[in-house]
Amino acid sequence: MPKNAYELANEVKAPVLGLYGAEDTGITPDQVEAMKEKLKAAGKTAKFKIYPGAGHGFFADYRQSFRADAAQDAWMAMQAWFKKYKVLD
């Protein structure tokens, strides 16, 4: 049986940034919080943000689920995270 994300938290080697929609039914805010706690307990670097009013695919500008404000903020947060951890110059 493959391991799930919660079981793999101890094995994470890179800083984790999670950007989620509060209305996502595939990955719920409760699941995001549980993962946040698992990573914290494992001593991993992680940051999560949950966008109110956004569902799954809030970043996809070709879908009805697109939320421009959340997508813009997530884009900026992702770039800042990548720069902080030397993924981007």
Image (cartoon, grey):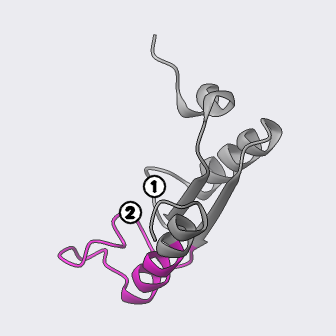
What is the total number of numbered labels drawn onto the structure image? 2
- Distance in Å between CA atoms under marks 2 and 1: 7 Å
Query: x, y percentage for residue 52?
Result: 56, 78
Query: x, y percentage for residue 37?
Result: 76, 45
Find the residue positioned furthest to the left.
Answer: 62
Residue 48: quarter of image: bottom right
**Depth check, front residue: 26 or 2:** 2
**Depth check, front residue: 53 or 4:** 4
Tell me the residue that label 1 is attached to: 25
- Is residue 78 covered in magenta? no
What crowding class fits label 2: few (fewer than 14 Cα within 10 Å), some (14-19), or many (20 or more)? Answer: some
Front position among marks 2 and 1: 2
- Where are the magenta residues, as a range? 51-77
Residue 56 tag number: 2
Q: Is residue 57 left or right of residue 50?
A: left
In the rendered image, the vertical position of residue 69 relative to residue 18, given as above or below: below
Q: Residue at x 53, y 70 (%)?
A: 83
Q: Is residue 30 left or right of residue 70?
A: right
Query: x, y percentage for residue 39?
Result: 71, 42
Q: Residue at x 47, y 60 (%)?
A: 87
Query: x, y percentage for residue 27?
Result: 49, 51
